[in-house]
Image (tube, rainbow, N blue to C red):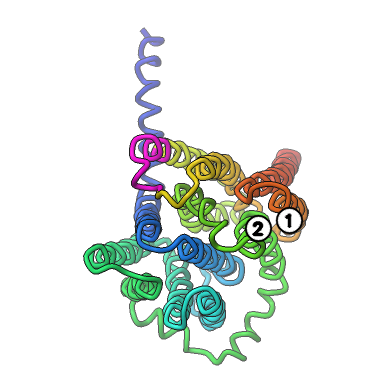
Amino acid sequence: MAEAQVAENLPTGRVRRLGSLFGRFGLASLSSAIVSVSHLLVQLFSIHHLETAAIGTLAFLLVIIQFGYGLSNALVSTPYTIAVNQGDDADARSFDFFFPVNLMLAASQGLICAAIAWATASPAAALLFGMAGMLSLIRWFGRSNAYAHHAPARAARSDLAYAGTILAGLLIAMRTGADMPAIGGMLVAASLVGLLPFGLAYLRRHFAMAPARAMGAYRPVWKEQSAWTLVGVLSTEATSNSHSYIVTLLAGPTAFAPIAVGMLFFRPVNVCITALTQLERPRMTRAVARGDHDAAIRSERVFMAALVMLWLATCAVAAIALYAFPGLILKPTLDHRLVMVAVGLCALLSLVQCVQTPMSVMTQARKAFRPLAAQSMRSCGVGLVAVTLLVLGTAPVFSIGGVVLSQLVMMLGIWQLDRKWRRDQRGAA
């Protein structure tokens, strides 16, 4: 009788755990996925309405904006989250200096995006993509701020407003047509509307302190955390997106176009990885700060399970789209075989990142920034050499294989750090 009761409760327990998993990540995943879908639709629109070189240019600019999210995480978002979650008595106002620092970072990204668009597109595209690059980081830190203060609904409202504006712009563009400046204008409008849920008070805090004074207050954060985190982000970017930069530099935007289409399918996974990192980092940081290492490890495992489930769903959607609706994604000017190779390699790369990210976030929560940066630098060297050799010796699409190799090196290094920490905790107990 007891055995039958246990057997009956097993499926119920699994359903409850699955429900808890979706409840925990559902809001952040759904809103981030909607943003990803909006970016996906922008790139699908570009595939059918822009020249092949413009497709590569747009994809490269989106890579730069995504890189900006990583810089924001390293320099402002992660240190701010850790600072305000160190204890219940943390005063958020004492960390206002992060906001002017974020504004300087956003302005820098805007200038970089403008320079790229000027060189590869037009002055009008440079103006609009420059604004889009700057506003994207201001909105991104708003999301991080919401997650840091355990208000994920505010971040979700921003995501929904952002994605809704892009979808409205695409509906208009489907009737009127659109070029690179028009797409840049869509991103600017979406970022402005996406800032509304954070309110004017959030925007004013970016100007509440002189830049020199903010940098002076930020200096201890730089020395303790951000310098090492920045090394990690730069080397990780060089590792994970070295193919984007090297192919575009050596072979041009046209050669990057098939890779961009392959990356397109897994952009939702990348965006959700970044968004869920913002959600889980405060949870892990608090657990480690309290000394509740079991809770931190459970959070790491659940985070990884959620990402792998998301990856499986994305692979299923990619397979259906490519085999059932190839005309939706591919156009005659693209080499279909190269696109298929790109999708397969991007799927493998995405899986490695899904396994690696939770361990990396746990390492950050333990403030082990220097060892993490060392692992990132090691994998960066492997990636740059492998990608360059593959671009020079084979079709550019195979450069993704070099990124996979470097990410495997990174994953194994972080796994060793994670195992060592767990052994140390068991020994201390």
Amino acid type indicated by mark 1: Leu
Magenta highlight range: 317-330
Residue, far top: 1
- Residue 31 in view in this figure: no
Q: Quadrant of the N terminus?
A: top left
- Measured from the top left, where is residue 213 in percent x and y? 60, 90
- The structure residue drawn at horizontal position 37% and vertical position 72%, both measured from the top left corner, is 191
Q: Which residue is mark 1?
A: 384
Taking the spot 46% from the left edge, 36% from the top edge, the residue there is 312
Front residue of 113 and 206 = 113
| Residue located at (41% from left, 85% from top) | 204
| Residue 302 as seen in the image, left or right of residue 424 | left
Q: Which percent across, then down, holds residue 340?
A: 50, 40
Q: Label 1 near label 2: C-beta < 8 Å?
A: yes
Check the image and report above or below for 92 versus 420.
below
Quadrant including the C terminus: top right
Q: Which residue is mark 2?
A: 242
Element type at mark 1: helix
Name the N-terminal-most of marks 2 and 1: 2
**Within the image, what quadrant is residue 352 found in?**
top right
SS at badge 2: helix
Q: Amino acid at mark 2?
A: Ser
Is residue 190 at all visible to an observer of this figure? yes
Pick the front one: 356 or 223: 356
Q: Is residue 358 magenta?
A: no
* Closer to the camera in the image, 363 or 120: 120
| Depth check, front residue: 200 or 429 | 200
Image position, residue 319 (x, y; %): 42, 36
Q: Is residue 75 above or below residue 63?
A: below
Real-space Cα separation, disc 2 to disc 1, in angstroms: 6 Å
